Image: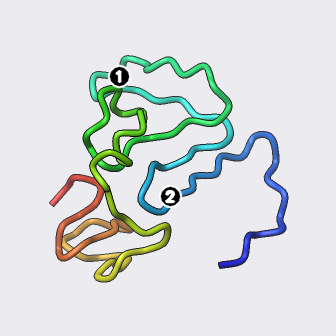
Amino acid sequence: MARSSVKRSADETLITPYRDGPLLVRGPVRIEDQDGSEIVIEREVVALCRCGKSRSRPLCDGTHKLIHFRAPSGLEDGIRKGSHLNGLAGAEYVNGSALNGHR
């Protein structure tokens, strides 16, 4: 897959899912836990765990390599965007389950 030649502005955030690895977040980002407390990140690029086994979740610690985590960089089969599925506008679904945690 070809890389985009479009330059990202300094105030734009780009999230890249890496094959068999984390989500890399480049650009300004603020992360809060579910109670609204900020998770302080002092980096320009943040790696977010996708495998669920990191000991520093939500951040990646490389555990995905040890457990042989597998996930594509792009969309997986079965994902579709729906504007009215299960009443959730704009939600993404995998095999009928909303990725945003709502049903």
Looking at the picture, tell me which residue is in the foreground, 26 or 88.
26
At horizontal 37% and vertical 65% (from top left) the residue drawn is 71
Report x, y in % for residue 8: 79, 53
Q: Which residue is mark 1?
A: 36
- Figure colour scheme: rainbow
Q: Which residue is mark 2?
A: 17
Kind of element beneath mark 1: loop
Query: How far across and how far down the image is residue 13, in percent?
Result: 65, 46
Q: Residue 91's quadrant in the figure?
A: bottom left
Say left or right for 103 vs 45.
left
Q: Is 28 drawn above or below residue 100 in the view shown?
A: above
Up-down: is 14 above or below 61? below
Is residue 41 shown above or below 16?
Answer: above
Amino acid type, mark 2: Pro
Disc 1: CA contacts within 10 A as few (<14), some (14-19) or many (>=20): few
Q: Is residue 17 left or right of residue 101?
A: right
Image quarter of the C terminus: bottom left
